[in-house]
Image (spheres, coloured by chain):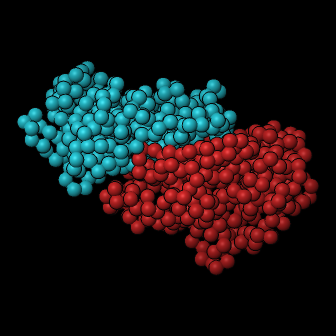
Chain colours: A cyan, B red
Amino acid sequence: MRSGEFATILRLKERFRSDNAAGILLGIGDDAAVLEHVATKASHKLVWTIDEQVEKTHFRRDLAGWIDIGWRSFMAAASDLAAMGAEPWCALSALSLPADFEDEDLDALARGQHAAALRLGTSIVGGNLTRGEVVTVTTTLLGTAEKPMLRNTARPGDGIWVAGRVGLAAAGLFALERRLHDDRLDGVKEAWLRPWARIGEGRHAAGRASALVDVSDGLAQDVGHIAEASGVRAVFDEGALREHAKRTGLDSIGELVLVDPLELMLAGGEDYALAAASEEPLEGFWRAGTFVEGQGVALKRTTGRERELFELGFDHFRPRM
Amino acid sequence: MRSGEFATILRLKERFRSDNAAGILLGIGDDAAVLEHVATKASHKLVWTIDEQVEKTHFRRDLAGWIDIGWRSFMAAASDLAAMGAEPWCALSALSLPADFEDEDLDALARGQHAAALRLGTSIVGGNLTRGEVVTVTTTLLGTAEKPMLRNTARPGDGIWVAGRVGLAAAGLFALERRLHDDRLDGVKEAWLRPWARIGEGRHAAGRASALVDVSDGLAQDVGHIAEASGVRAVFDEGALREHAKRTGLDSIGELVLVDPLELMLAGGEDYALAAASEEPLEGFWRAGTFVEGQGVALKRTTGRERELFELGFDHFRPRM
C-alpha cells in the first residue's frame, strides 16, 4: 500500500463504519471484534462461512474494476449463508495486497465490499491486512438461522427448484474474457461483475424445502452436491431449462457468444442462484427438474432420453470444504 | 491438488474431526458450519478474529515444514483471541494452494493446524479450498470472553507486564534464514516454528489488567499500540529486558546470531507473547516497564536516559485492522 498502514486502517474503519449494527460491541481497531450474541434470538443457530477470492483464479484486474471485485467477493461469501437459509449478521475481511497496490484501488475494493454489505443489511466489523504477491480477498460471515438448510436431506419425488437466473454470469465472463463489445452483452457482464446473494429466497426456502445449495459452479455440479449427499438422482428437464433461457434472454446471448445456453446453465457458475429440493413449489423459485431414486445427475432431453452429465468422479473448479 | 477435490475434503474432514466439540451442530461438508451459541454462557461475549499467512510474506517453504506452517498459522490467529482475554471456541480455515501442491504436503499442513487446534482445545469446523499461485492459510476463530480486554484503556502508572518470552522467535527466523547450524540455536528455531497462543495468561489478565495486546510485531510496536490507543507513553526498562534476555538465554543467542538481544526483543515479533498494562502484578507475567503520562514509546537506559523508539509515524510489517 502506498500510504502508511495506520492511515489505511483509519480509512477502512471509516468506510466500514458499523455504529448501528445490532450486537456489535467492538468493531475495527483492536485485536478482534466483540459481538453480543444476545442480539440474536435464542432459538436461532449461528451459521458461519468463509470464502476466499484469489487474483488470477477468481478474477483478473484487467476484466473487472476493484469495486466489482470487492462486491463479488462479499456476495460470494454471503451466498453460502443464503444456501443455509440464514440471515447475514456481520463479517470480517482479510485482504492480501501487493506492496505497490494503490490507495485508490484499495478504496474502490473496500467501497465494493461495503456496498455489498449494506445491500445485505450487514456490516464489516474487522479484518486483517497483509502483503502478498497476488490480491486475495477473504470474507468470513456470521449469520443466524432458526432452521439451517442442509444438502443431504433431499427426497425422491422432490422437485429441483431454482431461485434466480443461471448461466448469465458465465456468458458475461466469457464476453469479458474475449473482449466482446456489444451492448446486448452488458446485462450478462453485469451479472458476472455484480451478482447478489439470494438471502430472501434462502430464508423463504428454510423450513419449506427439504435441501438447499447455492449455485457457484453450475447447476449440474451444485445440484449434484444435493444428489450425492442425499443419495438421490437429479434429473434436469431440458424443456424447463430452455424456457428459463428464453425468459432471461440467455438463448439469444448464447448465439452472440457462440455457446449453447444449456451448457452455460449446467456448467457455468457464479450467478449465485439457489437450488432447492422441495415437494411443494417455493415462492420466487422456478422448477428445473426432479429428484428421483438412484444416483448421479442427468439431463432429460425433450425427446425423453436421459443424458448422464457426469460419469464417475468430477472435480470442482472452485472447491469447497 | 493432486487428488480429486472430494477425496481431499474427505481427508480434511477426517483430519479435523470435531464430533465432540461443544455447540458444533454441523461441521465440514455443507455450505457453512452451524453453531449453537447456547453452548456459551449468556454473560459471555463472542470474540471474532481472522488472520492470513501468505507464502513469501510470512513463511518460506524452504525454511519451515508444512506442519510447522499449519501450526504457526493457527496459533497466530489464536493469539488475537488471547490478546482479548478470550477462550477459543472453534475455527474455519481457508486454504489457497497451487495446482501442483502435493497431497502429502496438504496432509502435513492440516496436521499442523489440527495439532494447534487440539492444543488449544478447539476445533476446525469448516473452511474453503481454492487454487492460487502462492499458498495462503487464513484462519478465522470464534472465542468467548466475559470481559474482553481492549487496548485503549491503559492508565499512567500501570506497569508494562509481559507473558511469555520475546525475541526468541526473531532470533530463530534469523538463524533459519541465514542457515546457521548450531545445536544451541535449535530452541530459538523452535520458538519461531512452533509458537503458541497464550490463552491461559490472557484469561488471567482479563478483568485484572487495564489493557492487553499480543506481541506479533515486536514489543515496541505492539506495546506502542496500547500507548497510542490509550493516550499514554510506554517506557521500557533496559534492566528488566536484559534480565529477561539472560533468563531465556537470549543474551548468548544474540552473540551467536550477532544481533543485540534488545533489538530482537523490541523489534522482533512472532513469539506471540502477551503484553498488558496493569497496576498490579499478573501471575505468569514479568514486568518490562511502565506507562506514564505523555505519548510515544521509549527505552529507559540503565544510565537513566530515555531513548525514543519511534519518531513520528511507524508502519507495521504485518498490519492489522
Residue A184 in the image: above or below residue B143: above
Give the number of callouts. Answer: 0
B122 shown above or below A67: below
| Residue A168 in view, yes or no | no
Identify the residue at image location x=25%, y=56%: A313
Quadrant containing the N terminus of chain B in the rendered view: bottom left
Res B195 visible: yes
Query: In screen coordinates, is A203 left or right of B40?
Result: left
Q: Residue furthest bottom?
A: B183
Side (left or right) of B56 relative to B285: left
Judging depth in this view, the residue of B16 and A195 nearest the camera is B16
Q: Residue at x 41, y 47 (%)?
A: B30
Q: Nearer the viewer, residue B237 or B74?
A: B74
Is the C terminus of chain B in the top left, top right, bottom left or bottom right quadrant? top right
Q: Residue furthest right?
A: B304
Q: Check the image and report above or below for B128 versus B190.
A: above
- Location of residue B284 (image quadrant): bottom right
* Location of residue A216 in the rendering, given as x and y in whole percent from the top left corner: 34, 39
Task: Please tell me which residue is depicted at 63% across the width and 78% down the height of the picture.
Answer: B182
Q: Position of residue A303 (x, y in %)?
A: 7, 36
The spot of residue A23 in percent (x, y) is: 64, 32
Name which residue lies at 30% across and 31% down: A280
The quarter of the picture where residue A157 lies is: top left
**Could you tell me residue A110's position as x and y percent?**
52, 32
Query: For the view shown, which residue lies furthest in the left direction?
Result: A303
Camera-side residue of B161 and A310: A310
